[in-house]
DNA sequence: AGAGGCACCCGCACGC
DNA sequence: TGCGTGCGGGTGCCTC
């Protein structure tokens, strides 16, 4: 699933392709993508717009257009943004929208499970509109150990559920949550409010460390994820615990376990990540 | 307000 | 082989 590193990889590659270029036209073939907009109205609004930059907060992409408005995208679970040097005919599998670029080339939004969303967001007043949707981006300076501690204090929900909460920190999904909790030696089921300040600091560092590694590896492609050029990432080979049930912990050789925490498939080392009593 | 459950989808793994 | 069933997962919304 695209999490912060995958979306960041897409952001960088897409920026290389389309920043400074003008949209020739667009076609929205799945109305659900732009609901409640009417597909032709949505597509028409893109025509002739120049792409000024591409930003990212958590797993959201903001394709900033002239006219002080951003095409805002979320890929959810199976969304892909794929570059083509022409306009593919027939369209790529699971195509929901295609954006044609002046001078040649196109970007396809493909999405087998059709959870992804697209909408417009004005630049003026955006902070007010966005307020509460996400907390600080995990890789930004605004995400601090102290801030994380403030958000965890007094909370009884398990640590994994809390770092998956995009209002606490934006960008962590199921994969990197498991990896960060392992690095920080925090049990996924441990109540977030139980963590002492040093352990919160450790968790904060681990989140940043694993996300940074994911970006460097070009994301994780254990199944569907592909970058803008259709290439796989390499992070799946660097997982320490995620999807490694039955394998040995790389630190202590204990067998990795899998269970369900926060309604998510969860992997951890029972020895490195013990449940702390009254920590 | 916090916590948990479910809907939204559909490809895929699995069992018969 | 073919069919039916269950699962997963990010987010928003709902209930308690």
Image (cartoon, coloured by chain):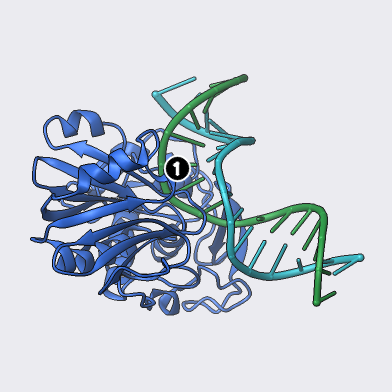
Chain colours: A blue, B cyan, C green
- Residue A226 to residue A190: above or below: below
> Where residue A52 appears, x then y in whole percent?
9, 54
> Where residue A133 appears, x then y in whole percent?
31, 36
Q: Is residue A251 left or right of residue B5?
A: left
Q: Which of A263 and A279 is in front in this view?
A: A263
- Residue A105 to residue A42: above or below: below
Q: Is residue A20 left or right of residue A72?
A: left
Q: Which of A250 and A8 is in front in this view?
A: A8
> Where residue A189 appears, x then y in whole percent?
54, 49
Is residue A162 something one can see in this rendering? no
Q: What element carries label 1?
A: helix
* Residue at 30 percent of width and 54 percent of height: A204
> Where residue A246 appears, x then y in whole percent?
63, 75
**Label 1 belongs to which residue?**
A32
Is residue A42 something one can see in this rendering? yes
- Residue A186 to residue A41: above or below: below
Q: Quadrant of the N terminus of chain A?
A: bottom left
Q: Which chain carries label 1?
A: A
* Residue at 10 percent of width and 40 percent of height: A68
């Amino acid at each position: 699933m695209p999490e912060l590193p995958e979306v960041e990889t897409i952001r960088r590659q897409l920026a290389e392709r389309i920043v400074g270029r003008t949209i020739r036209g667009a076609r929205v073939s799945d109305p659900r993508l732009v609901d409640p907009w009417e597909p032709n109205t949505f597509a028409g609004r893109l025509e002739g717009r120049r792409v000024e930059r591409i930003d990212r907060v958590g797993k959201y992409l903001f394709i900033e257009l002239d006219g002080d408005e951003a095409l805002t995208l979320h890929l959810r679970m199976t969304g892909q943004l794929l570059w083509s040097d022409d306009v593919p005919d027939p369209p790529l599998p699971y195509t929901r929208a295609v954006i044609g670029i002046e001078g040649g080339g196109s970007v396809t939004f493909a999405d087998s499970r059709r959870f992804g969303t697209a909408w417009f967001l004005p630049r003026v007043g955006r902070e007010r509109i966005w307020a509460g949707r996400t907390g600080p981006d995990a890789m930004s300076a605004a995400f601090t150990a102290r801030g994380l501690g403030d958000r965890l204090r007094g909370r009884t929900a398990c640590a994994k559920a809390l770092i998956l909460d995009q209002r606490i920190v934006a960008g962590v999904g199921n994969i990197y949550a498991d990896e960060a909790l392992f690095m920080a030696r925090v049990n996924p089921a441990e109540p977030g409010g139980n963590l002492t300040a040093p352990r919160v600091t450790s968790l904060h560092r681990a989140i940043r460390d694993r996300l940074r590694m994911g970006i460097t590896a070009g994301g994780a492609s254990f199944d569907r994820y592909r970058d803008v050029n259709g290439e796989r990432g390499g992070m799946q080979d660097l997982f320490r615990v995620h999807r490694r049930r039955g394998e040995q912990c790389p630190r202590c050789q204990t067998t990795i376990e899998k269970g369900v925490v926060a309604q998510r498939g969860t992997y951890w080392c029972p020895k490195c990540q013990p449940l702390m009593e009254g920590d």
